[in-house]
Image (cartoon, rainbow, N blue to C red):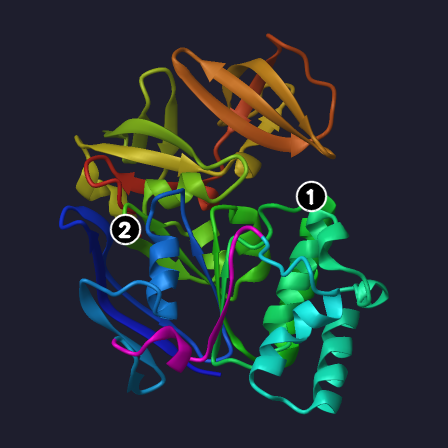
């Protein structure tokens, strides 16, 4: 177990490709932290630097209070799982899982005990005697994960380990990984571009883009209070709605003029928005927070339904007003194309972003 601290970590490839840009991040001891972001954002490079597989251009890496920046991988005592399962096809499942223990000359009795324990956790105890090459992709990844967790390293590093498995196995393994991390009390870093995985698994999420850390906090914090429009859109299914507005004053109230419609925010004298009158801002609201009404209600704005997407027991409804298109996520109900509905923007769910920096406006 170890706390991992990254201090101004920077990686430049070939002297010109900036992969990680001055990343400072503390991964708490026994915590499960997800590095989340799109492909090419620097998350895998960050993980490889933690493992010692990449040398930072600048910055330092600490495990607890010990600097490990220049230590080779074998001296860091980390375990890493890659996106695609790497197994030893000529070995049995038991031999695959036991390999890191045998390499460290762990007594045979202890090896057997630990292999059987972790095999039971991953539901592969019945295939321990089988050769690994005959297994399906999902079972192979379970073997790889079991081989990783049979050890007791300082840090577990998982680089998109569920990408290659089918959806049902992915859900199963999410649950197993969360239980394992909680039971073992081990530090874990989990790289993914799948925001649902990060929200499900992680204690804290580090959202990255273009090599930079954009936000670091609990899943609830990054979902409910995104620090910029990128985080708001990237996390969520669908992502947050954004509406460009100019801030105006009308009879002591604030009006957000989106050209095709206007949203009223009362009590301008006491509102932080008074400093933005005459300026452009971006109004944000999550699809599930929009109120949709079949009939006109006070404070609601009429929209036309242009697309309806069934998603399980919910509908994602695309709504158009002039040139503006919003998405609402609502319970299943009768909804037809070109139907007129009335949309209300509950004030408690509105988020505001600077029109130039795209950063959140602090209330």
Front-most of 341 and 188? 188
Query: Element under label 1?
Result: helix
In the displayed structure, would residue 199 be above or below residue 336?
below
Front-most of 124 and 253? 124
Report x, y in % for residue 225.
41, 52
Label 2, label 1: how far apart the Cα atoms are: 29 Å
Residue at the limit of the structure toward the top, as seen here: 338
* Extent of the magenta region: 70-84
Report x, y in % for residue 184.
62, 80
Report x, y in % for residue 152.
56, 82
Identify residue for label 1.
Answer: 167
Earlier-in-chain disc, 2 versus 1: 1
Front-most of 39 and 240? 39
Residue shown at 19% from the left, 36% from the top: 356
Instruction: Report the side of 158 relative to 87 (left or right).
Output: left
Kindly indicate the quadrant of the structure image that contains residue 117. Answer: bottom right
Query: Element under label 2?
Result: loop
Residue shown at 63% from the left, 10% from the top: 337
In the displayed structure, would residue 5 be above or below residue 264?
below
Query: Tag on residue 211?
Result: 2
- How many marks overall? 2
Front-most of 206 and 308? 206
């Amino acid at each position: 177990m170890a706390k991992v601290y990254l201090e101004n970590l920077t990686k430049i490839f070939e002297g010109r490709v900036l992969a990680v840009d001055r990343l400072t991040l503390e991964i708490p001891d026994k915590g499960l932290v997800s590095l989340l972001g799109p492909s090419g954002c620097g998350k895998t490079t960050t993980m490889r630097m933690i493992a010692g597989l990449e040398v930072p251009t600048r910055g330092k890496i600490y495990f607890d209070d010990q600097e490990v920046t220049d230590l080779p991988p074998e001296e860091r005592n980390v375990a890493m799982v890659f996106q695609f399962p790497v197994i030893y096809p000529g070995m049995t499942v038991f031999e695959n899982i036991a390999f890191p223990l045998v390499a460290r000359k762990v007594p045979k009795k202890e090896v057997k005990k630990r292999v059987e324990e972790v095999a039971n956790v991953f539901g592969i105890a019945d295939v321990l005697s089988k050769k690994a090459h005959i297994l399906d992709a999902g079972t192979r990844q379970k073997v790889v994960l079991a081989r990783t967790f049979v050890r007791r390293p300082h840090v577990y590093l998982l680089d998109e380990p569920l990408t290659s498995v089918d959806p049902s196995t992915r859900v199963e393994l999410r649950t197993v990984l969360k239980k394992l991390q909680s039971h073992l009390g081990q530090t874990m870093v989990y790289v993914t571009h799948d925001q649902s995985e990060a929200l499900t698994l992680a204690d804290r999420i580090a959202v990255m883009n273009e090599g930079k850390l954009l936000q670091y906090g609990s899943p609830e914090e990054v979902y409910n209070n995104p620090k910029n429009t990128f985080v708001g859109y990237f996390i969520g299914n669908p992502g947050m709605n954004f509406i460009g507005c100019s801030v105006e004053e009308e009879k002591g109230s604030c009006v957000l003029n989106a050209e095709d419609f206007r949203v009223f925010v009362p009590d301008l004298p006491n509102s932080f928005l008074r400093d933005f009158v005459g300026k452009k801002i971006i109004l944000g609201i999550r699809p599930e927070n929009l109120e949709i009404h079949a009939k006109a209600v006070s404070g609601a704005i009429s929209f036309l339904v242009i697309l309806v997407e069934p998603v399980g027991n919910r509908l994602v409804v695309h709504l158009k007003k002039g040139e503006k298109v919003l998405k609402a996520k609502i319970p299943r109900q009768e909804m037809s194309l070109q139907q007129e509905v009335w949309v209300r923007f509950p004030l408690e769910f509105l988020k505001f972003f600077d029109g130039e920096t795209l950063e959140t406006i602090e209330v």
